[in-house]
Amino acid sequence: MRPFGSVPFILLLPAEGENEENLMLMRRIGEQYTKVPFYRVRRLTAWLRVQGYIVNPKRVRVLMRRMDFRLFIPIRGVSPYMV
């Protein structure tokens, strides 16, 4: 298992049905998440808005699920051995 800092979140092949804007947002989310893995949906949404993107928390959550980030987001009160 790799530590958070070395997890490769680079999108090598575009997923079917994804438009260019979603792919760009997923790339930006992946880059930021590798720098600060403790950012959640609300903080990433705020960060993307500061960067000039028009996004809402639901869209960021959906994109994170498509990138399979739910496996890397630690859940408070749950040991990693219990997951």
Image: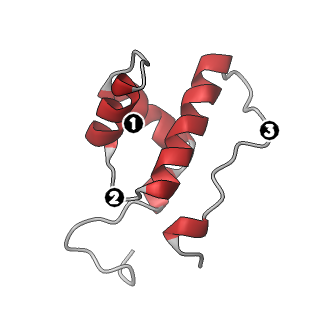
Residue in view at x 62 percent, y 27 percent: 24
Report crowding for label 2: few under 14, some 14 to 19, many 20 or more residues within 10 A (C-alpha).
some
Q: As displayed, is residue 68 above or below residue 13?
A: below
x, y percent for residue 7: 60, 64
Residue in view at x 54 percent, y 29 percent: 25
Q: Are marks 1 and 3 in contact (CB under 8 Å)?
A: no
Q: In terms of sequence position, does the residue under pointer 2 or pointer 1 come before the other?
A: 2
Q: As displayed, is residue 76 above or below residue 28?
A: below
Residue lying at the far left of the rendered structure: 77
x, y percent for residue 26: 57, 35
Judge from the rendering whether residue 40 lies leftward or rightward of residue 15; answer left or right. Answer: left
- Please tell me whether mark 1 sits on a helix, a strand or a loop: helix
Residue pointed to by mark 1: 61
Residue pointed to by mark 2: 38
- Please tell me whether mark 2 sits on a helix, a strand or a loop: loop
Residue pointed to by mark 3: 13
- In space, the residues marked 2 and 3 are separated at their CA atoms by 26 Å
- Please tell me whether mark 3 sits on a helix, a strand or a loop: loop
**Circle 1: residue type:** Arg
x, y percent for residue 15: 72, 32
